[in-house]
Image (spheres, helix red, strand yellow):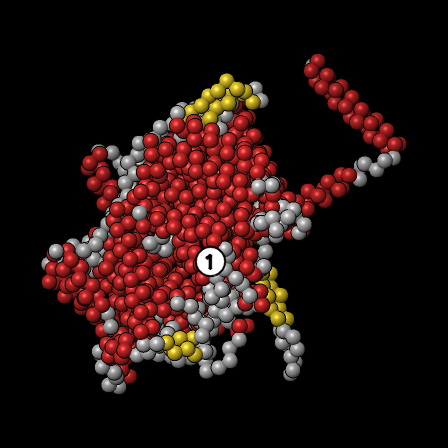
C-alpha cells in the first residue's frame, strides 16, 4: 500500500510541478527585458483552457496524430518515474538505458505525428528533431557511461546519488547543452518565434489543437523538468545529504537551472542551423572528457583496493600515466 | 527419440511439398506448414529439454558417414527458420500467385521448400563435407529464389552478384573445412577447443561466413539481392539466410579455439557495420533497398555481442561476455521477426501500388490500415523502442558492454566506443524509420498508384499479424523466451556462465508502459471525439491549397544526416539550377550509390579485366608465333634446368 501511495505521490509531483518550469523561465526573461511578463502559472491556465477546447484536425491526418501524442506523453511520464527521488521508487540494473529509449519513444511519436499532416514545414521540423537528437543522444549516453564508471552501477538510483568526481563541471556543462537542445530552447531553437522555417519543436506541433496540444505542451514541460532533475542529480552529491537537505538542494538546483535557461535565452540569439551540430559535438566532447576524468579517478580507486585485496598489481592501463 | 521422429516428419513433409509445388499449391502449403511445425517442435523440445540430439548412421554420402546433431545453438536458429519459413509460405500463397506469375509461381514454391530444407541441413550437419554440400545447396536455391522474375535485367544482375559473392564466400569455407579436416584427420565436426593450432582457421571462417552475413565491407551483394527478390524471399533472406552466416560464426567460434585478436576484429566489424549500415539506409530512396541496409546494421549489432563474448572467452569468461552474447543471440531472433515483418509489409505496399520508390508513395494508411499498423509496429521494434522486442535485445547488449567498461580492463577501450556508437545507431535507425513510415504511410498520396492502393488479403495480413504478435510477445514477456537464449549461450563454449539480467523488472516496465500507452491513447481519442472534430486543411503558413508535391520528401528528410556521412556515402548529385529572368525547368536529385561496390570492387575488377585483356593478346591464332612461344618456353626451361643442375652438382 505504501508503494502505491509513494508512486502516486511521485507521479503527482512530476505532473503538477512540470508546468512551473516554463513559467519561471518566461518570468526571468521578462525581468531581464524589463517587462512584467505573464504570471508564473500561465501554462497551467493554458493547459486547463486547451483541455476544454474542441479539436481542429487536418483532412489528411490518421488517428495516430492524436494517439501518438498520448503515447509520447506516457513515455515521458515513464522516463520521469525512472529518475530517483529519495529512497524507494522504481530501480533496477539497466534502467538508465530504458530511460534514454523512453525519451526516444516520445521523439518517434512526435516526429511521426508531424509527418502525418503532410506539411512541408512540419516535415522540416521533424527532420531537424530526429537529426539533432542523434548527437544529443550520443552526448547523453556518454554522460551516463561517465556516471556508470563513477558509481560502478547501471541503475539511475545509484548512478545519480554518489558524490561526483572531478569531472562534475564538464558533465554539468555537457548535460546543460543537451538540455537546451533536447528541449528546443535558445540557441538551438526559439520557442517564441512564429516563423515556421526557423523552428524545430514548435513547427512540429503546428497542426495540434485542443486537448492533444495540451498533452504536447505538458509533455514538453515535463521533458524540461526531467532534464533539469537529471542534470541536478548528476552534479549534486544528493546521496550524502539528509533527506530534507537533498530535497531542498534538488529544488534549488532545478530553480537555478530554470533561471539559467532564462538568462541564456535573454542574452543569446538563436544559432544558425549549420552551427547546431558543432555545439552538440561540444556537448559530446564535454561528456567524453567527464568520462575520461571519471575513468582515471576510478582507476586510482580500483588500483588501491585491488592491491589491498589481491596483493597483486592491477591490470596495466591500456595507455596513459599510472599513479 | 521424439526429436528424431519430429525431424524425420519435417524432412519427409518438406520432400513431399516439392511434389505438390507445381500443381497443388494448397497441398504444398500444408506440407510446408507441417514441416515448419515439426522442426519448430523439435527445436523447442531441444531448447527446453536441454539435451543434445545426435544421429550417426551407417549411411555414407561422399564416403563420409551421415552425422546429424541438434544442440541448443542450432535449435535456436532452427526455431527462427521454422517460424519465418512457415509464415513466408502462407504469405506467398497470396503474394506470388499462379494467376499473377504463371511461369515462376510453381518453381518458386519448389525452390522455397528446397531452400528451407537445405538451411535446416546446414543447421543439422555435423560433418564438414556434408555441411559444405548443404551450404552450397542453400546458396544455389537462394539464387533461384532471388531471380524468380528473371525477365528483368536488374533482377538478373542482382542474382549474378549474389551468386558471385556467395561463391567467393563458399571458396573460403572450402578452404576452412578442408584445412580443418587435414589438421584433425577427420571431417567430423564438434567441440575441439583444446587444439590451439586450429585458431588461425578462424579468419577463413570469418571471411566465408561474414560474406553471407553481410558484414560491412562484404555486404556488396546484399542490397540489390534483397531489393529485387520477391518480398517473401527478401523476408527469409534477411530474416534467416544471412543468419546462417551468423550461425557459422557463432558455431565455429564456439567449437574451435579463436585467435586472441578474433573477438576484437569481430566487435570492430560489428560496430562499423551497425553505424555505416544505417547511414547507407538513410540515403536510400527504394523501400526494400533501405530495409536491406538495415540488415547490415542489425547483423552489426549481433556481431558486437558475439565479438565481446569472444573477447570475454580470452579473459576467463566473465559474465559480461555471456550477457553480450545473449543480447546478440536474442537479436538474431528479433531481427528475423521484425525484419521479416517489415519486408512482408514492404511487399504488401509493392503488391498494392507496384512501386518501391518512396517518393511515389504516401498516405497509404487510409487504404491499407493493417499493413500500416503492422509496418509501424515493426518500425518501432527495429528502432529498439520499448516495449517491443528490439529494445530487449539491445538492452542486453548494452548491459554486457557497460559491465565490460566497469571491468576496468583493456576491453573498456573498445566497450566505450561501442556503447556510444550503438546509441548513435539507435538514434539513426529511429530517424530512418520515422522517414519510412512518414513518407510511405502518412501524408497525402504522391502518385496515382498510391491513390489507388488496396489492402492485402487475409493470408498476407495473417502472416504480418503473426510476426507482429511475436515482436510484442518477446517485448512484453521476454522471461518466457529467456531460457532458450540461456541454453544457446551455455552451448556456445560449454561454459556454465550465469547469465543474469533483471528481465523481470524490465518486462514489468514494458507491460505497464504498453498498457498505459494504449489506455492514454484511447482516453485522449475518446476525449477528442466526444466533442466532435472539426476538419480543416493542413496549416501551411497560411497557404490554403497545399498539394501532394509540396510535402517533405524522403531525400530532404534524411538530408541533414546524409550530409554528415557524405564522406562515405559519396552521394551523386544532379542539379540544374534555375537560370535567367524566366527560369525554365530546374531540378535537383541525389542518390546514394553502392559505394563499396562501385568505388572499390568494380574498379578492382576492371583492373583485373584490363590485365586479362592485355594478356589475351598473346593468343591470336597465328601458328608461327605459337611455335616461337614453344621454342622460347623450351629455351627458358632448359636454361633453368641447366642452371639448377650445375648449382646442384657444385
Query: Can you say whether A213 is above or below B151 in the image?
Result: below
Residue at the (79%, 27%) spot, across then down: B633
Q: Nearer the viewer, residue B278 or B18?
A: B18
* Residue that lies at the very extreme toward the top in this rendered image: B649
Residue B46 lies in quadrant = top left
Q: Give the residue at x 24% y 85%.
A: A36
Subunit bearing disc 1: B
Compared with residue B62, is residue A22 higher up or lower down, i.e. above or below? below
Viewer-proximal residue, B409 or B575? B575
Above or below: residue B221 compared with residue B167: below
Q: Residue furthest bottom?
A: A35
Q: Residue B445: percent from the left, percent from the top?
A: 52, 68
In the displayed orientation, state which residue is furthest to the right.
B624
Query: As rendered, which of B126 and B68 lies closer to the eye?
Result: B68
Instruction: Name the quadrant of the N terminus of chain B.
Output: top left
User: Residue drawn at (50%, 57%), measured in percent from left and top?
Assistant: B456
Spot occupied by residue B413 in the image (x, y as percentages of width and height): 37, 45
Count how many numbered circles sit on residues in the image. 1
Q: Is residue B223 visible?
A: no
- Can see residue B49? yes
Element marked by disc 1: helix
Q: Position of residue B313 (x, y in %)?
A: 36, 34
- The residue indicated by pointer 1 is B371
Q: Is residue B104 left or right of residue A253?
A: right
B130 lies left or right of B372:
right
Q: Residue B618: percent from the left, percent from the top? A: 80, 37
Figure quadrant of the C terminus of chain B: top right
Bin the neighbour count of mark 1 within 10 Å (Cα to Cα): few under 14, some 14-19, many 20 and up. Answer: many
Amino acid at each position: 500500500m505504501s508503494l502505491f501511495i509513494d508512486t502516486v505521490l511521485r507521479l503527482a509531483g512530476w505532473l503538477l510541478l512540470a508546468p512551473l518550469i516554463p513559467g519561471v523561465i518566461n518570468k526571468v526573461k521578462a525581468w531581464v527585458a524589463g517587462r512584467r511578463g505573464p504570471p508564473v502559472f500561465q501554462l497551467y491556465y493554458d493547459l486547463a483552457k486547451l483541455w476544454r477546447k474542441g479539436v481542429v484536425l487536418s483532412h489528411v491526418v490518421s488517428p495516430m496524430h492524436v494517439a501518438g501524442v498520448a503515447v509520447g506523453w506516457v513515455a515521458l511520464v515513464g522516463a520521469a518515474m525512472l529518475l530517483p527521488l529519495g529512497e524507494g521508487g522504481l530501480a533496477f540494473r539497466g534502467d538508465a538505458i530504458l530511460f534514454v529509449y523512453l525519451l526516444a519513444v516520445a521523439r518517434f511519436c512526435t516526429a511521426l505525428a508531424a509527418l502525418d499532416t503532410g506539411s512541408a514545414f512540419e516535415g522540416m521540423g521533424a527532420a531537424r528533431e530526429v537529426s539533432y537528437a542523434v548527437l544529443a543522444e550520443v552526448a547523453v549516453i556518454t554522460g551516463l557511461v561517465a556516471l556508470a564508471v563513477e558509481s560502478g552501477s547501471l541503475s539511475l538510483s545509484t548512478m545519480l546519488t554518489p558524490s561526483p568526481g572531478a569531472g562534475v563541471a564538464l558533465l554539468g556543462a555537457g548535460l546543460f547543452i543537451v538540455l537546451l537542445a533536447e528541449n528546443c530552447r535558445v540557441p538551438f531553437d526559439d520557442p517564441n518565434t512564429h516563423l515556421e522555417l526557423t523552428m524545430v519543436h514548435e513547427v512540429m506541433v503546428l497542426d495540434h489543437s485542443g486537448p492533444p496540444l495540451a498533452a504536447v505542451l505538458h509533455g514538453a514541460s515535463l521533458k524540461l523538468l526531467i532534464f533539469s532533475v537529471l542534470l541536478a542529480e548528476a552534479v549534486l552529491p544528493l546521496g550524502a545529504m539528509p533527506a530534507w537537505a537533498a530535497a531542498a538542494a534538488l529544488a534549488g538546483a532545478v530553480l537555478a537551472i530554470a533561471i539559467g535557461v532564462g538568462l541564456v535565452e535573454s542574452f543569446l540569439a538563436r544559432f544558425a542551423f549549420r552551427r547546431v551540430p558543432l555545439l552538440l559535438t561540444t556537448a559530446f566532447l564535454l561528456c567524453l572528457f567527464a568520462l575520461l576524468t571519471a575513468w582515471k579517478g576510478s582507476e586510482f580507486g580500483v588500483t588501491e583496493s585491488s592491491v589491498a585485496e589481491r596483493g597483486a598489481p592491477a591490470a596495466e592501463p591500456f595507455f596513459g600515466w599510472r599513479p | 527419440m521424439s526429436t528424431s521422429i519430429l525431424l524425420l516428419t519435417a524432412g519427409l513433409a518438406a520432400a513431399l511439398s516439392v511434389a505438390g509445388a507445381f500443381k497443388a499449391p494448397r497441398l504444398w502449403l500444408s506440407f510446408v506448414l507441417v514441416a515448419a511445425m515439426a522442426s519448430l517442435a523439435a527445436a523447442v523440445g531441444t531448447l527446453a529439454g536441454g539435451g543434445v540430439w545426435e544421429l550417426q548412421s551407417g549411411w555414407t554420402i561422399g564416403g563420409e558417414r551421415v552425422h546429424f546433431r541438434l544442440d541448443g545453438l542450432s535449435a535456436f536458429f532452427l526455431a527462427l527458420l521454422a517460424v519465418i519459413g512457415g509464415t513466408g509460405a502462407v504469405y506467398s500463397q497470396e503474394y506470388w500467385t499462379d494467376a499473377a506469375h504463371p511461369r515462376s509461381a510453381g518453381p518458386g514454391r519448389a525452390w522455397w521448400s528446397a531452400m528451407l530444407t537445405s538451411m535446416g541441413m546446414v543447421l543439422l550437419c555435423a560433418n564438414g563435407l556434408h555441411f559444405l554440400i548443404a551450404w552450397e545447396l542453400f546458396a544455389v536455391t537462394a539464387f533461384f529464389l532471388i531471380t524468380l522474375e528473371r525477365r528483368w535485367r536488374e533482377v538478373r544482375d542482382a542474382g549474378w552478384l549474389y551468386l558471385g559473392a556467395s561463391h567467393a564466400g563458399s571458396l573460403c569455407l572450402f578452404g576452412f573445412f578442408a584445412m580443418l579436416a587435414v589438421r584433425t584427420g577427420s571431417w567430423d565436426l564438434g567441440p575441439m577447443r583444446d587444439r590451439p593450432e586450429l585458431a588461425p582457421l578462424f579468419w577463413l571462417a570469418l571471411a566465408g561466413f561474414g560474406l553471407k552475413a553481410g558484414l560491412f565491407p562484404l555486404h556488396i551483394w546484399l542490397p540489390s539481392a534483397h531489393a529485387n527478390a520477391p518480398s517473401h524471399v527478401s523476408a527469409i533472406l534477411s530474416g534467416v539466410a544471412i543468419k546462417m552466416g551468423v550461425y557459422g560464426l557463432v558455431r565455429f567460434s564456439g567449437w574451435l579455439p579463436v585467435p586472441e585478436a578474433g573477438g576484437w576484429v569481430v566487435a570492430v566489424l560489428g560496430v562499423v557495420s551497425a553505424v555505416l549500415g544505417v547511414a547507407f539506409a538513410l540515403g536510400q530512396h527504394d523501400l526494400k533497398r533501405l530495409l536491406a541496409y538495415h540488415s547490415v546494421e542489425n547483423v552489426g549489432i549481433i556481431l558486437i555481442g558475439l565479438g565481446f563474448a569472444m573477447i570475454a572467452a580470452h579473459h576467463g569468461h566473465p559474465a559480461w561476455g555471456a550477457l553480450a552474447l545473449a543480447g546478440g543471440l536474442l537479436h538474431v531472433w528479433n531481427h528475423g521477426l521484425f525484419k521479416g515483418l517489415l519486408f512482408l509489409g514492404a511487399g504488401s505496399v509493392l503488391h498494392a501500388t507496384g512501386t518501391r520508390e518512396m517518393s511515389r508513395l504516401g498516405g497509404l494508411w487510409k487504404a491499407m490500415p493493417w499493413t500500416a499498423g503492422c509496418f509501424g509496429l515493426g518500425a518501432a521494434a527495429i528502432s529498439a523502442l520499448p516495449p517491443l522486442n528490439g529494445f530487449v535485445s539491445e538492452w542486453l547488449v548494452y548491459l554486457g558492454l557497460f559491465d565490460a567498461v566497469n571491468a576496468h580492463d583493456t576491453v573498456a577501450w573498445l566497450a566505450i566506443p561501442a556503447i556510444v556508437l550503438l546509441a548513435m545507431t539507435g538514434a539513426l535507425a529511429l530517424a530512418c524509420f520515422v522517414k519510412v513510415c512518414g513518407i510511405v504511410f502518412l501524408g497525402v498520396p504522391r502518385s496515382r498508384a498510391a491513390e489507388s492502393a488496396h489492402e492485402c488479403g487475409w493470408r498476407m495480413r495473417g502472416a504480418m499479424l503473426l510476426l507482429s504478435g511475436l515482436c510484442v510477445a518477446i517485448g512484453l514477456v521476454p522471461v518466457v523466451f529467456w531460457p532458450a537464449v540461456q541454453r544457446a549461450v551455455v552451448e556456445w563454449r560449454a561454459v556454465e556462465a550465469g547469465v543474469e539480467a533483471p528481465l523481470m523488472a524490465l518486462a514489468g516496465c514494458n507491460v505497464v508502459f504498453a498498457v498505459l500507452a494504449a489506455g492514454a491513447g484511447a482516453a485522449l481519442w475518446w476525449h477528442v471525439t466526444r466533442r466532435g472534430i472539426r476538419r480543416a486543411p493542413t496549416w501551411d503558413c497560411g497557404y490554403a491549397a497545399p498539394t501532394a508535391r509540396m510535402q517533405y520528401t524522403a531525400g530532404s528528410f534524411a538530408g541533414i544526416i546524409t550530409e554528415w556521412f557524405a564522406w562515405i556515402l559519396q552521394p551523386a548529385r544532379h542539379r540544374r539550377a534555375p537560370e535567367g529572368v524566366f527560369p525554365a525547368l530546374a531540378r535537383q536529385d541525389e542518390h546514394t550509390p553502392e559505394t563499396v561496390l562501385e568505388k572499390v570492387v568494380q574498379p578492382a575488377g576492371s583492373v583485373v579485366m584490363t590485365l586479362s585483356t592485355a594478356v589475351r593478346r598473346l593468343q591470336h591464332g597465328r601458328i608461327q608465333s605459337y611455335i616461337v612461344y614453344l621454342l622460347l618456353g623450351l629455351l627458358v626451361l632448359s636454361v633453368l634446368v641447366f642452371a639448377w643442375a650445375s648449382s646442384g652438382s657444385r
